[in-house]
Image (tube, rainbow, N blue to C red):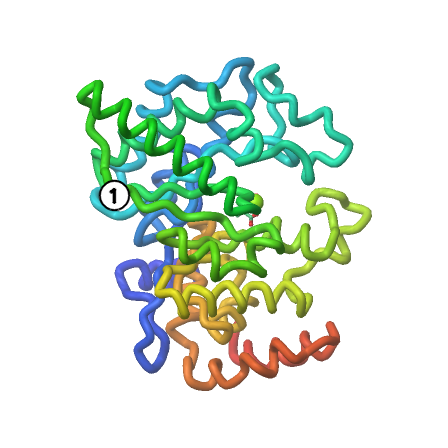
Amino acid sequence: RLAALAAFRGRPAVTLEGQLITLEANIELPEDLPLVTDSGAEGIGLYRTEFLYMNRTAPPDEEEQLKAYTRVVEALGGAPVTIRTVDLGADKTVDGSYSNASVATNPALGLRAIRLCLRKPGLFRPQLRAILRASARGPVRLLLPMICTLQELTQVMALLEDCKRELKRQGLKYDPALPVGAMIEVPATAICAEVFARHLDFLSIGTNDLTQYTLAIDRIDDEVNYLYSPLHPAVLHLIHRTIAAGEKTGTAVAMCGEMAGDIHYTRLLLALGLRDFSMHPASLLEVKQVITESDQRKLTGLAQQILECCDLSEMQALLEQINEGLP
Ligand code: PEP
Ligand code: MG
């Protein structure tokens, strides 16, 4: 089966009637790069930089980050690398004293990700500078986690412009047109996706957190694990709403949550209009195979049925019908 999958490596991800789909990889450390090469990914859709910050007492400085990002950009040889600014707090805890996120009663609702970065510019600026400098070495995209208000976006943009001015003064190179996007992983942001789309170059749906926050189910609490599923109609509506906002505004929409790498959801997501998937590289060829065996026209007609389905067992029956013929 592995050998059969390997045959898909050099082939495009295209549905039966010719719809081209983009498949990218999620990575956590530059050490994941060999897996990416093996998967035939078209780029990095999510580089989770927090792993550079974990298990140490001080954050990595600008030079250390620049080295890590450059290594990834150069290994990709001209394919795009989406670098997500650090998403610390909640499930990604740090031992060091440079984050006070872990003292919150509800860390997932607390000072995490972009909130922490905006509170601590001393933590955020070196990363923005490192990402900007890496963008001089190849195509880089900047992705912001946990964006929830437009004000946060305005603050980030001001900081980013300031870092650009600083680099220019220092004679350091960067891509002046670095694309900026936001994770859609808070329900409020998904509901207002069109507004965010108008201010950004791209959106990326984070179904792990979007499911957690929409359903009020802690993604790492085993006691409520049985309730945690992106198949809830509310989650599917938010995904669909985000994709529709992208279509309306001409903004690229990707998905980088676990849902994008699960072959049981591939056709469902195609039906909802998703054209850009990013996942753990180990899942990529499997997902590509499913795409090449999917009939786009049949799937598009199912979107309304999926969105109107309010009962989990009905949804599962519908999913079985959609997934007919899959292993
Ligand atoms: C997500 O929330 O879906 C996501 C991709 O981000 P993370 O899993 O790193 O929170
Ligand atoms: Mg997330």
Q: Can residue 28 be seen by looking at this rendering?
A: no
Q: Is residue 200 above or below residue 235?
A: above
Nearer to the camera, 250 or 289: 250
113 with respect to 91 (left or right): left
Could you tell me residue 144's position as x and y percent?
A: 46, 42
25 with respect to 95 (left or right): left
For the point 39% across and 34% down, the residue is 158
In the rendered image, which quarter is residue 91 located in? top right
For the point 65% across and 35% down, the residue is 90
For the point 51% across and 14% down, the residue is 58
Q: Can residue 103 be seen by looking at this rendering?
A: yes
Could you tell me residue 291's position as x and y percent?
A: 41, 71
Q: Is label 1 within 8 A of ligand 1 (CB to nearest ligand atom)?
A: no
Could you tell me residue 142's position as x and y percent?
A: 37, 41
Q: Is residue 225 above or below residue 326?
A: above
Nearer to the camera, 33 or 173: 173
Disc tally is 1
Quadrant location of the N terminus? bottom left
Per the image, the residue denoted by label 1 is 177
For the point 36% across and 33% down, the residue is 160
78 with respect to 30 (left or right): left
- Ligand 2's quadrant is top right
Indicate the secondary structure of the residue bearing disc 1: loop
Could you tell me residue 327's position as x and y percent?
A: 53, 71
Residue furthest to the left: 171
Q: Amino acid at mark 1?
A: Ala
Q: Is residue 137 above or below residue 232?
A: above
Mark 1 surroundings: few (<14), some (14-19) or many (≥20) residues within 10 A: few
